[in-house]
Amino acid sequence: MEVRLEAFCEAEMDEQWSYVGKKSEQRWLWYAIDHATSAILAYVFGRRKDEVFKQLKTLLQPFNITRYYTDDWGVYERHLDTAEHQVGKRNTQKIERKNLNLRTWIKRLTRKTICFSKSILMHDTVIGLLINKVEFGVDIHSKLQV
């Protein structure tokens, strides 16, 4: 009998809306989580465009993901192989829960709020710092050594 071990990964992917300055200046957080552990694998900021999704997909290549779970947004269908892609709410519950957590922790991601960023740099930095602290265990309060 031959035994073969393969590393595989299933990921949930979603995008979350925010804005910088005014609601017409939309800024989207695109990210993917491991379906088994709910850990964030990669994230990018940008518009709700195919090019930004392609950046996220590039960051996910080293993980050798075999199955993607997403909502019904068209960009996923255009750029993910149908054999590896499953649309639906059944397998995206963990990432939707993560969306709620991020909205609770960062008021800039809340839809009706008076808390918003005035610059793209500050928007991406604040959200990125939280993700790095909570998900990757980075000590964001330590002083940088130059």
Image: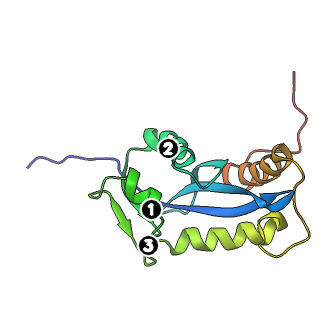
Disc 1, SS: helix
Label 1 to label 3: alpha-carbon separation: 17 Å
- Residue mark closest to the camera, 2 vs 1: 1
Label 2 to label 1: alpha-carbon separation: 13 Å
Disc 2, SS: helix
Q: Position of residue 85 (x, y in %)?
A: 35, 60
Q: How is the image coloured?
A: rainbow
Which residue extends farthest top?
146
Residue 91: mark: 3
Judge by depth and name the residue closer to the eye, 85 or 67.
85
Label 2 to label 3: alpha-carbon separation: 22 Å
**Relative horizontal placement of residue 78, taking residue 18 as reference (left or right):** left
**Residue at mark 2:** 54
Q: Position of residue 124 (x, y in %)?
A: 77, 48
Residue drawn at x 87%, y 47% is 119
Disc 3, SS: loop
- Residue mark closest to the camera, 1 vs 3: 1
Q: Earlier in the sequence, mark 2 or mark 1?
A: 2
Q: Please identify the quarter of the rendering in which residue 62 is found.
A: top left
Residue 104: mark: none
Q: Amino acid at mark 2?
A: Lys
Residue drawn at x 82%, y 76% is 112
In the rendered image, the quadrant that contains the C terminus is top right
Q: Amino acid at mark 3?
A: Asn
Q: Please identify the quarter of the rendering in which residue 27 is found.
A: bottom right
Residue drawn at x 65%, y 63% is 16
Q: Amino acid at mark 1?
A: Gly
Q: Earlier in the sequence, mark 1 or mark 3?
A: 1
Neighbour tally class for label 3: few under 14, some 14-19, many 20 plus, Cα within 10 Å = some
Find out whether the residues at labels 1 and 3 contact each other: C-beta distance under 8 Å.
Answer: no
**Residue at mark 1:** 74
